[in-house]
Image: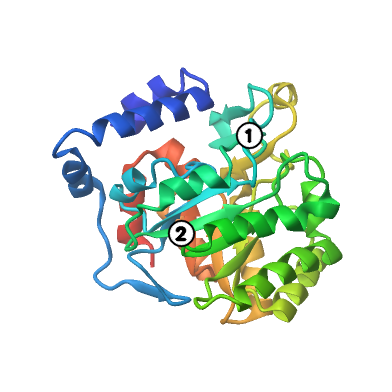
Amino acid sequence: MYRALIRPLLFLLSPETVHGLVKGLLKIFFFIPGIPFIIKYLYSTDKPEPYNIFGLNFPNRVGLAAGFDKNAEFYKELAVFGFGFVEIGTVTPKPQPGNPIPRSFRLPKDKALVNRMGFNNLGVGEAVKRLKNRDSNFIIGGNIGKNTLTPNSEAVNDYEICFNALYDYVDYFVVNVSCPNISDLRELQDQDMLLGILGRLMEIRALKTQKKPVLLKISPDLNFKQIDETLEIVKSIKIDGIVASNTTISRENLLTSKEFVDKIGKGGLSGLPIRDRSTEIIKYIREKAGKDLLIIGVGGIMSVDDANEKIAAGADLIQIYTGFIYEGPGFVKKLVKKVG
């Protein structure tokens, strides 16, 4: 019903308008007695045994990627749809509006999205307020970044602020230095800058009683030499894992007309077009890093086969975002039931 009836209606509106509409409807419906139970009955299907990964018990391997619940506003509602975990953010120290609207676009022929949101969020303080009353049994990741106006030379301070603020309220961290929608952000993937940021966060973690996992989210646009350099840092600092991968600046091999794509302009491309590159990177990292490095596979998961390819390539967990938008809430249950 979603693809035949609901999606065509939603796709008449802009992606950002739909996101706001869905967020509002979720809040309204979940105030109605019985609705959460009905939704959980229809959509949730956890595995008999949880997956224990880096000391956390995941009810299933399917998570929601960062970007959908930027401000930790409706992770409780999303949990009822059957996700094994939700990653909030990207959050920054200070609130920021992000880039000018319009900044999110669909490419239906390619089952893809282009966005240049620009880390629009209410700031880490607001996220913390909403996470203080969270259900500790549901796993939440915190995706952290820097404010747009913070120069790269001071970026480590922004990551440190977010890390400290969220530490008691999320189960794992993802350091986002690879989003293409923040000016010069991807320069932070350079060895020296990355070493400085990750090194500082691991120093802070070493002082904590509970050692929460720290992962790095990388770009699909890195070449293999750059990935090797990144893995050297990961190994030397001993962070826990990699999220592969973020959105891409590439526009190769799209079915959508070049004129339409050029009119959209800059932004990160997600969805089916990055599926194969993301899987290729996962396989490469697993072969290089061995079995002990945690890998969360994300990028172009639009079917059960896509998800299983990520697992077969070496991903421990998977995340969806664009696939959730194109395939609907029933997609989560389908993945949970059939992903290896």
Residue at position x 25%, y 52% from top?
A: 44
Can residue 298 be seen here? The reply is no
Q: Which residue is mark 2?
A: 169
Report how far apart the C-alphas of labels 2 and 1 lie in the structure: 28 Å
- Type of amino acid at the residue the image marks with label 1: Asn
> Residue 131 location in percent, x, y?
42, 51
* Side (left or right) of 35 relative to 128: left
Of mark 2 and mark 1, the one earlier in the sequence is: 1
Quadrant in the picture for residue 286:
bottom right
- Looking at the image, residue 160 lies above or below residue 285: above
Give the quadrant of residue 223: bottom right
Q: Residue 32 vs residue 187: left or right?
A: left
Where is residue 303 drawn, in percent x and y? 43, 50
Which mark's residue is nearer the viewer, 2 or 1?
Answer: 2
Instruction: Check disc 2 and give the amino acid type.
Output: Tyr
How is this picture coloured?
A: rainbow
Give the SS element for disc 2. loop
x and y percentages locating residue 85 in the rendered image: 41, 57
Give the residue drawn at x 17%, y 45%: 37
Disc 2 crowd rating (10 Å Cα; few below 14, some 14-19, many 20+) is many
Can I make out residue 204 in this image? yes
Q: State which quarter of the image contains the C terminus.
A: bottom left
Element type at marker 1?
strand
Q: Against 214, is 334 above or below?
A: above
> In percent of the image, x 71 and y 77: which residue is there?
237
* Residue positioned 69% across, 29% down in the render: 99
Residue 150 image point, x, y percent: 78, 44
For label 1, the residue is 115
